[in-house]
Amino acid sequence: MPLYIWCVKVVKILLLLLAFSVRLPANAAEHPFYVSITEIHIKPSQQLVQLSCRMFTDDLEDALRRLNGVPADLLVPKDEATVNALLNAYVQARVQVQVNGVPQQLQFIGYESDEEAVWVHFEGKLTETPGRVDINNSLLFDFLPGQTNMVHCYLDEKRQSTKLDCPERKAAFQW
């Protein structure tokens, strides 16, 4: 076989292998960007701090599975108490809120989901009106180096926002 024909066949085989090695999304639920939303609501009149975190369902399920070695179906949980415990531990380990330098003790309230995203909710008692709110947020940074976490902080109706790109995890809001 002439060298030219042999080279053409090798190039065709390499192109074919390259075409099959390109990763296509497994399903329509996969997404090309990784972003979460964290909302902190400070309500001095009610002496209340509320924290809600929204993450893509597939990313959160993947993180919980990788960390705990068990699948966590957030849409149709087989054991709701276990899923609640996993979500509580995951978020509490990756999101901390301080008001005027005092760490806030937040209790897991629950979560709600649709096919695309999950909201995880926490609540705590506010002991003083904030002058400063600090947050440490590393949600999904474990396995997604391209993760961005949007943070919105509300003092009553006033809002301040920031963006944390992995590995940046700290933000402060001054009131």
Image (tube, rainbow, N blue to C red):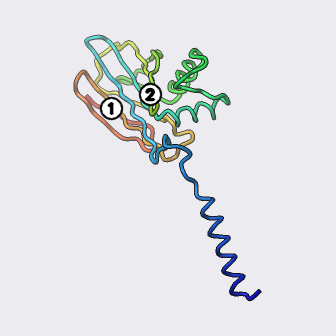
Give the quadrant of the N terminus.
Answer: bottom right
Badge 2 marks a residue whose secondary structure is loop
Residue 97 coordinates in the image, percent (x, y): 41, 25
Of residues 61 and 19, the one drawn nearer to the viewer in this rendering: 19
Q: Which disc, if any, is residue 144?
A: none
Q: Is residue 18 left or right of residue 56?
A: right
The residue under the point 43% across, 44% down is 165
Of residues 130 and 147, the one drawn nearer to the viewer in this rendering: 147
Q: Which disc, if any, is residue 152?
A: 1
Q: Quadrant of residue 72?
A: top right
The residue under the point 25% across, 30% down is 159
Residue position for label 2? 114
The residue under the point 37% across, 19% down is 50
| Residue at the farthest bottom position | 2
Q: Give neighbour class at mark 2: few <14, some 14-19, many 20+ (Cα, 10 Å).
A: few
Q: Which amino acid does label 2 sit on?
A: Asp
Residue 12 coordinates in the image, percent (x, y): 64, 73
Q: In this view, does 12 lie to the left or right of 162?
A: right
Nearer to us of marks 1 and 2 is 2
Give the quadrant of the C terminus.
Answer: top left
Residue 156 lies, with reference to residue 19, above or below; the image says above
Residue 18 lies, with reference to residue 81, above or below; the image says below
Residue 52 coordinates in the image, percent (x, y): 40, 24
Q: In which quarter of the image is residue 135?
A: top left
Q: Which amino acid does label 1 sit on?
A: His
Residue 166 coordinates in the image, percent (x, y): 47, 44
Badge 1 marks a residue whose secondary structure is strand
CB under 8 Å between discs 1 and 2: no
